[in-house]
Image: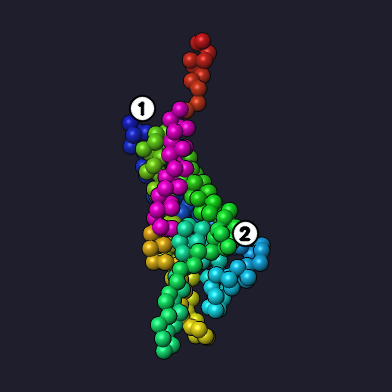
Amino acid sequence: MSRTALSRPVPVFAGLVRGHVAWVVGYLLTFVLTWSGDHETTFASALGDAPLPELYQAVGWVFYSAHGVGVVVEPATRGGSVSSFTVTLVGSDGFTPALYAVPAVCLLVAGALVAHRTGVERVREGLAAGLTVVPGYFVLAVAGKLATTAAWSMRPGGTASPAAVGVLVAGVLYPAVFSGCGAVIVGILGRRGPPDRSSARSA
């Protein structure tokens, strides 16, 4: 292999952009799949007496749940002890389990696109390219948690937001695994490469 291939630069900027795009596309797909059914009934069943948040916050909660991250509801204490509880909005009695595939597929595609754009030809190069998606996805995972934290002044009061550890799960673990896999697949295919035309002709 040539020295150029061995010293191929890591596509940091391309990975950052595709990390942002993967998050935004995943969020929009979650909105489409969530609001195609009776979403208000599902939220009411999951949240109990807690009021519904703003539209963008509710969609964000479902998107985090699609990463396996629960929403922590902390009711306000009014003269008594009220325990917080965690809600998972995807699967079982929640929204369609198909939502679990949304972030996974978006990240697989993002990693594959970065690797393809870089022209990786080795598994190690593919993994390095795929991991560049992590920073962009992580930044929006942090921003998403802040944006989707809801505080209620009406009864029963309290707050709700994606679990704190969910920022690491959704923002680091998911893109590292799925974007890495998508880029590695491209690296494996690039490693095989197209058939050698000169060998074919001589045969």
Magenta part of the protein: which range? 169-192
Query: Which residue is labeled 2 in the image?
Result: 33
Q: Residues within 10 Å of mark 2 (few under 14, many from 20)?
A: some
Badges 2 and 1: C-beta atoms under 8 Å apart? no
Q: Which secondary structure is most common in the magenta stretch? A: helix
Which residue does the image show at 43% across and 39% down from the upper left? 184
Q: Is residue 139 visible?
A: no
Q: Nearer the viewer, residue 182 or 93?
A: 93
What amino acid type is highlighted by mark number 2?
Leu
Which residue does the image show at 49% across and 16% down from the upper left? 198
Which residue does the image show at 64% across and 64% down from the upper left? 35
Q: Nearer the viewer, residue 119 or 4?
A: 119
Q: Position of residue 2 (x, y in %)?
A: 35, 28
Query: Which residue is labeled 1 in the image?
Result: 1
Q: Position of residue 161 (x, y in %)?
A: 45, 71
Q: Earlier in the sequence, mark 2 or mark 1?
A: 1
- The answer to whether 177 is drawn above or below residue 143 in the figure is above
Q: Position of residue 195 (x, y in %)?
A: 50, 22
Q: Nearer the viewer, residue 171 or 71?
A: 71
SS at mark 2 in the image = helix
Q: Is residue 134 magenta?
A: no
| Residue farthest toward the bottom in the current orientation of the protein | 79
Of labels 2 and 1, the one closer to you: 2
Side of 192 relative to 128 (left or right): right
Q: Residues within 10 Å of mark 1 (few under 14, many from 20)?
A: few
Q: Position of residue 128 (x, y in %)?
A: 37, 43
The quarter of the picture where residue 187 lies is top left
